[in-house]
Image (cartoon, helix red, strand yellow):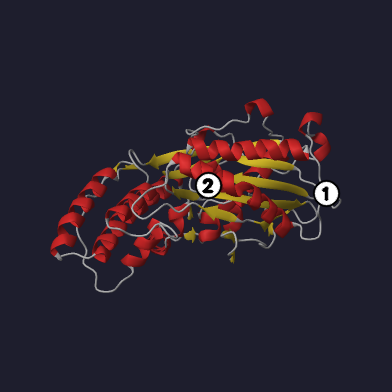
């Protein structure tokens, strides 16, 4: 990871090429077999280059991804991003977040292109992918405008991408997990997902607030900083020694979970316990994490059993929490399976994941007309036709 201190832009560039085994996706159609209106430009080496723009929440990122037909591999060429960090005790609001993204998107595009092509001032871009949704309206619209502008400037196709599907596709490629159960945990989403017949099927989800939202709101209650993120600062508090575990509501309803009641309870404990000195911030953070993560492990294990799967892939910003990864790995190992987890480079929202999902779609003839290049705050994971994946999936055992 490299930080440009003059701009605050964090770069996670230059990943090694990752070949895609045959069981991952459908074979790529030949370029000439695509309809004329779905063909796109490649560079002199025949490589497909896609720029991805992400900005659904408080992070705005631009990633550049390439596909090399000689090696059948995908490579992240650059992946800088910039995070909007609100003042202590506050969350990020749509208007301020949108203005943040607007202020930084041009610099991020320049940074991403310079890192990806340091000696090529005019690289051939095959397509521009952007986050259609779900997410916050203002930030999404800001990035959609940028994507439409670049598509016109570079005379290349647009590809609208589902945010969750992008997390999954980046995770599958980065961890080489072909068909896992997916736990998607972020500030705005909490879902357990499995794949079947070219759709990502939601087996369970939150019925109220997302786990990241729960953690962020609690961090504000106890006065933890938003820098670099509230959830990470909760994780650090929960690692302290000699902590007291407090019993909190454990709300699993079939395959769904609920976090709002837990948040209310732990907020009440914080107000009384911190005031009279019987509890520490670390006690509360530890107890909250253990309870929330145990609920997620339970519904993930149930999905594994139902689908007969042996791999679990964790994606989304909360997915880089080391304690969540440890608890999930313990469960998966007991079932004879493997955990596929990532660090902050790809768990946290980034442009490369949008480019990854975008390049899969582009290569199979999916493009977005300019008149349809909109965004939406509600875009379900299971609404996406994953045409690049084989029509097989889980089998009930």
Corner quadrant of residue 142: top right
Say if 80 sits above or below 378 in the image.
below
**Residue 360 location, x and y as percent?**
67, 43
The quarter of the rendered structure image containing the C terminus is top left
Q: What residue is shown with label 1?
A: 43
Q: What residue is shown with label 2?
A: 100
Is 283 in front, or is 388? 283
User: Mark 2 or mark 1, which is nearer the start of the sequence?
Assistant: 1
**Residue 140 location, x and y as percent?**
54, 38
**Residue 187 location, x and y as percent?**
42, 47
Is 388 in front, or is 125? 125
Say if 223 sits above or below 96 in the image.
below
The quarter of the rendered structure image containing the N terminus is bottom right
In the image: residue 59, left or right of residue 191: right
Corner quadrant of residue 210: top left
The outermost residue toward the left is 276
The outermost residue toward the right is 44
In the image: residue 63, left or right of residue 72: left
Crowding at dot 2, Cα within 10 Å, few <14 / some 14-19 / many 20+, comes out as many
Q: Nearer the viewer, mark 1 or mark 2?
A: 2
In the image: residue 190, left or right of residue 311: left
């Amino acid at each position: 990871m490299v930080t440009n201190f003059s701009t605050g832009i964090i770069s996670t560039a230059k990943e090694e090429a990752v070949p895609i085994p045959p069981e991952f996706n459908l074979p790529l159609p030949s370029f000439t077999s695509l309809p004329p209106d779905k063909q796109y430009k490649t560079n002199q080496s025949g490589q497909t280059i896609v720029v991805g723009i992400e900005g659904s929440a408080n992070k705005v990122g631009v990633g550049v991804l390439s596909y090399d037909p000689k090696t059948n591999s995908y490579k992240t060429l650059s992946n800088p991003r910039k995070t909007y960090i609100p003042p202590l005790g506050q969350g990020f609001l749509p208007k301020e977040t949108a203005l943040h993204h607007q202020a930084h998107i041009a610099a991020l595009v320049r940074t991403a292109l310079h890192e990806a092509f340091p000696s090529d001032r005019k690289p051939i871009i095959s397509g521009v992918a952007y986050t259609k949704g779900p997410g916050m309206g203002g930030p999404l619209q800001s990035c959609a405008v940028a994507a439409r502008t670049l598509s016109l400037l570079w005379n290349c196709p647009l590809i609208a991408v589902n945010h969750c599907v992008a997390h999954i596709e980046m995770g599958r490629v980065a961890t080489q997990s072909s068909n896992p159960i997916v736990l998607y945990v972020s500030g705005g989403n909490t879902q357990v997902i499995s794949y079947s017949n070219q759709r990502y099927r939601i087996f369970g989800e939150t019925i109220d607030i997302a786990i990241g939202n729960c953690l962020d709101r609690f961090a504000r209650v106890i006065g933890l900083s938003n820098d670099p993120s509230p959830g990470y600062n909760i994780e650090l508090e929960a690692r302290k020694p000699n902590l007291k575990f407090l019993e909190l509501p454990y709300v699993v309803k079939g395959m769904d979970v609920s976090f709002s009641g837990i948040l209310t309870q732990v907020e009440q404990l914080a107000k009384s316990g911190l005031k009279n000195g019987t509890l520490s911030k670390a006690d509360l953070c530890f107890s909250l994490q253990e309870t929330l993560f145990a609920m997620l492990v339970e519904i993930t294990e149930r999905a594994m059993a139902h689908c007969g799967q042996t791999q679990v892939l964790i994606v989304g910003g909360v997915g880089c929490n080391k304690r969540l990864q440890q608890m999930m790995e313990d469960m998966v190992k007991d079932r004879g399976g493997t955990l596929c987890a990532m660090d902050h480079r790809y768990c946290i929202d980034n442009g490369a994941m949008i480019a990854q999902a975008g390049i899969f779609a582009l290569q199979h003839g999916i493009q977005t007309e300019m008149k349809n290049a909109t965004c939406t705050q509600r875009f379900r994971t299971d609404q996406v036709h994953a045409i690049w994946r084989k029509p097989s999936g889980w089998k009930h055992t």
